[in-house]
Each structure stands twice: as C-alpha cells, then as structure tokens.
Image (tube, grey):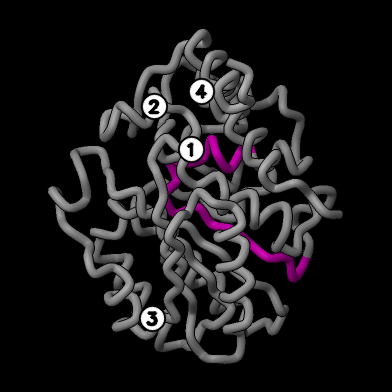
Amino acid sequence: MNYDLKEICKDIRCDILTCIGHLGVGHIGGCLSVVEALAVLYFKEMNIDPKNPQMAGRDRFICSKGHAGPAVYATLANRGYFDKKELLTLNQGGTNLPSHCDMNRTIGIDMTTGSLGQGFSCAVGVALGSKLEKDGATIYAMIGDGESQEGQIWEAAMFAAAKKLDNLIAFTDYNKMQIDGTTAEVNDLDPLCGKWAAFGWNVIDVKDGNDVDQVAEAVAQAKTNRGSGKPTMIILNTLKGCGVQWIVDLGTANHNTNVTEEQAAAAIREIRGED
C-alpha cells in the first residue's frame, strides 16, 4: 500500500500533541524531530505486520533515545498496532505506554530503552543475532545527539563495524540540542560524519532530516549498502520541536516541557494548517 507520507507525518505529530497534552507534560521537542524517520520506516520501508508483531524475520526498530517513546507510540497506533484511544493513557498508572519504551508492555516495541547508549548496544546485538540466524531482517536504530556523547555509543559503533553488520541502519537525530543546552556548548560532536566514517561506518548526511523525501531517499540509499560489510549511519539534521513554532521557539527548554490541552489543540491546528 502506498501511503501519503507527508500526511502521515501530520497525523503522527497531532497524536504526539494529543497524548502529551492530555498528560500535561512530556519530551515534546525530541519527539517532534524524529517524525519523518518514523513515517518512512513504518509506512514505507520496514517488513512488519501489525497483526503479527512477533513475526519471524521481521525488520526491527529500536529507539535508543527512549524519551521519544510518545513519537513511536503515535506511529505504532497510526500503523494499526493498537487503538489510538490508548495514547491517552501515556505515562499514567497501569498504562501500556510508559514515558520510555518498554518491550514488555507495548505491542510493537522491540527493545526496552531509556538509559542512554544502551538501546544502541542492544540494536547492534540484535543485528548480530539476525546475521547469525540469516533471517534477512534489517535492524534500524535511532540515537540522540546528546546521547552520542556517551562512550557506550562508540563502543557499540566499533563492535558493529568489526562484525561487519551491514544489516544495521542507524539514525542520529542531530537537532543539536540536549537537556542542558546545545550540543556544541555541552560537548561538541562535530565533525559527526567524520567520526562515524572513522569508526568504519557508511555515512549518509541528510541536510533536512524533517524533509520526508530526503529521509526516504537516504534509507533507500542505505539499503543498497547491504553486502558491503559496513553498517550505515544516517545523520538527520533536524529541528527540535519541528512542526509547532512555539515549541521550536522554546529552544533547549523544549526537551521536556508542560503542554496544556489548549496548547496542544492550537498546535494541532497549526500542523493541519487550520489557523
């Protein structure tokens, strides 16, 4: 089925706003910045079946920046893994949708994440397991730029290259902000592409990581790398809070912020072009 990815991105953003606005607080900035990548993966590229979420040989996505869980949940709901009404239970008592991704509680989540760096290591392990099983799956992972200051990221990167995991495609959400300031101020990552290349990865630099066509082209290019013996890192130059101007304007304060239902409703109108 061919989906209108730009409309899907709007739907995902609106559902992120709805569930975080209903809760009243959340990691809104880093959820909104990864939407295009999620739309491309779940609605175009990944071999998955919402009716059979444990399908053998399926492609898997691991959101190592686990605080973007609400974005993954909104994507899964739009893809048909569970009813959208469940989004309103985000991070509440008894929910199946905790703030950070939990594979034991949420249908469609392939790895529990949240402790920065660990999800990426798990993704590398899953890719190695897939290689050993020869199941043909592609393993996808999303890491944050602040997360990329963790040494565990680079240990995993080195291991993935050493084991020639060309079935692994990772993304860096390079919105250049983290909880304590800009990445340049806290612990500068540049030259980020050069670092990943030096660690033996195939690197694709996406100038606008919030342009769904550019992201789709990058993923298609990465998939042609299969057989090269190199994992691929796609650097997504994104805008934290993309799609909602007042959230963008908060700057680094949008990492985790209060969002009222009224603000969420206004943001949804902005996304839909209804103002």
The answer to if 140 sits in the magenta stretch is no
| Picture quadrant where residue 167 is located | bottom right
Residue under label 2, please give it.
247
Q: Amino acid at mark 4?
A: Ile
Whole-percent x, y for residue 238 in the image: 41, 49
Q: Residues within 10 Å of mark 4 (few under 14, many from 20)?
A: many
Q: Are marks 3 and 4 in contact (CB under 8 Å)?
A: no
Q: Residues within 10 Å of mark 3 (few under 14, many from 20)?
A: some
Q: CA distance from mark 2 to mark 1?
A: 9 Å
Look at the image and tell me whether residue 22 can be seen: no
The quadrant of the picture occupied by the N terminus is: bottom right
Q: Which residues are magenta?
A: 56-74
- Mark 3 vs mark 4: in front: 4
- Mark 3 vs mark 1: in front: 1
The quadrant of the picture occupied by the C terminus is: top right
Q: Earlier in the sequence, mark 2 or mark 3?
A: 3
Whole-percent x, y for residue 46 in the image: 70, 62
Q: Amino acid at mark 3?
A: Phe
Q: Which mark is residue 159?
A: 3
Residue under label 4, please give it.
20
Q: CA distance from mark 2 to mark 3?
A: 37 Å
Q: Residue at x 47, y 38 (%)?
A: 31
The answer to if 67 sits in the magenta stretch is yes
Q: Are marks 2 and 3 in contact (CB under 8 Å)?
A: no
Residue under label 1, please give it.
32
Q: Is residue 228 left or right of residue 7?
A: left
